Structures are given as structure tokens and as C-alpha cells.
Amino acid sequence: MTVLFFVAAAVAVIATGMVITTRKAIHALLYLVISFLALALVFYVLGAPFVAALEVIIYAGAIMVLFLFALMLIDPGRADEAREREWMRPRAWIIPSVLTAALLFELIYVMARGGVPGGLASGAAKAIDAAAQVKAVGISLFGPYLLGVELASVLLLAGLVAAHRLTQGLDRPEEEDAAPAEDTWRRVRRAGRRGGGI
Amino acid sequence: MSAISPVYGLGLAGVLFVLGLLGVLARRNLIFILASIEVMLNAAGLAFIAAGARFGQADGQVMFLFILAMAAAEVAVGLALALRIRRRFHTLDVDDLRKLRD
């Protein structure tokens, strides 16, 4: 288990290092997915399989897909012929391949061993198996942390409303969008100097 | 069966947090900065999970769920802002954006 933890940790650290050093945004996001998957394995080894599943589903699934769609809309540059050819070179493939292969071998190793039997972080955590742990999380989530759940739902609603409002009118031509607020203020100031209405 | 000390989990969380902070400080593209903030939030969640596993309590995982919801809302608003900035200023470089404000 210790070896498993350290290999997953090394994959996470290397992938995160590639996120902050690679030049193209799409490569950074794909490395970020690898980093999240490795962190999910770390959570699993630490004895939190429920959180590991959530990490894969929500972080590596939903949030990264949101990033990729936004990047597609932003269009950070022309994907021309030379860049396509560069992707086909083995030099661009070798680091992601090594990182994902390490994750794959760990996955096969864990499955061949039949889970993590008692390989948890401490003696206290050993007694909790996966189902009882999810139950404990649910009970504590809707018991003492109920107010936090309500606040999180309000926060998500606020995020939804803000994202909708901010992306309104993005399909219009670009000239109509050029700094209308500043224009309005200048008009208001000029009108104020003249002493009349707008 | 060898047990994993929670110190290792906290150490990994620290390393990942510092890497995310480095990304926020070093990169100039808004997309990279948002991704680095995601890395930092994830490292904070890992610290909660390691502490929760140390004490055998479910509270760490509950805190991770809250961090997850907050990260989702933050990414939605941040990416909408990035789309807006890209549309209005035709760049995502934060240095260029500061020059445009002056």
C-alpha cells in the first residue's frame, strides 16, 4: 500500500508540474485530468473510496469538461498543420504515456489484490468499510452539517445565475460589446457638466 | 500490512498546494491561473481527507464535498468571466489586461 501511495503521489506531482510548465492550454488541461485521477487513487489508498469516486466523476469528469468546452469557445490559437504534425511525434506522447501507464498498473494491482483490505491510514479507520463509511458521510452531511449543505446549494445556484448572466449576449457581433459601461458614464458626466439631463 | 502515515498525505497536499501557487504566480494566461487554483483547492481537499483518515471520522469527507461544490461554482463563474474578457479585450494575458485598464 505504501508503494501504491507513493507511485500515485509521484504521478500526481509530475502531472501537476506539467500543468504549470506546458505551453499549450489543452495539454495543461489533459495533464490536470491525469493529476486528478492520481489523486483519486491517493484518496482510495487513504481509505476514502466515496471521495475517490466523486473526484473522478465531478473533478475529472464535470469540471474538466467545463474547462475544455470553455477553451473550445475561447479558441487560444489556430491549430495549424505544423502543430498537428508535432502532436504525432513520439516526444509529445512519451510523458503522458508513462504517467497513465503507471496509473493503469496500479489499478490492475489493486484489482488483483481484491481491494484494499485493512490498508487504511490508521487503526481507527480500519474498522470502517466502504458502505458504512458512505453511510457515515451521509448521516453527518444531513445531520450536523445541514446548514453547510444549504449554503453549498445556494452557492451553486449563485454560480449558475452568474455564469448565465455573464455569458449573455456572447453570440452577438463583437462591436456591440465594446465597453458600453464606460460610454454611459462619459455621457452621464458630460450631461452633468452641462447641467441638463442625459 | 503497512499503514500510511497521515504525514505523507499532508506532505503531498503541501507539495501540490505549492505547485498550484507557483502556477498562479508564474503563468500569465487566465486559463492556466484557473487550472492552478483548481490544483490548490484539490490539495486542500487532500489535507482534509488525510486528517479525516487519521482520526477515522467522516468530517473530512464532508469538508471535501463542500470544497467540491465551491470549486464547481468558482470554475463556472471564472470561465464565464474569461469568455467575457476574451470577447471584449481579445486577450487572456493578465499583464496585457492590466495595461488596457490604464
Image: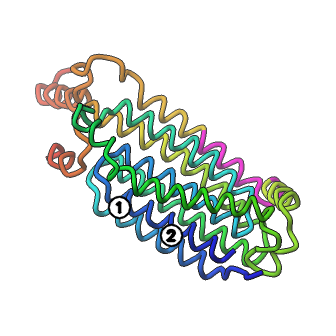
Cα separation, mark 1 vs mark 2, equals: 18 Å
* Predominant SS along the magenta part: helix
Q: Is residue B50 magenta?
A: no
Residue A198 in sight from this viewpoint: no
Q: Report x, y in % for residue A59.
A: 57, 49
Q: How many marks?
A: 2
Q: Which residues are magenta?
A: A142-156
Report the amino acid beneath label 1.
Gly
Give the answer, above or below, for where A84 lies relative to B35. Answer: above
* Left or right side of A55 for B61: right
Q: Which residue is mark 2?
A: A10
Q: Which residue is mark 1?
A: B23
Secondary structure under tag 2 reads helix
Compare residues A140 and B40 and report the one nearer the observer.
B40
Q: Is residue A153 magenta?
A: yes
Chain bearing mark 2: A
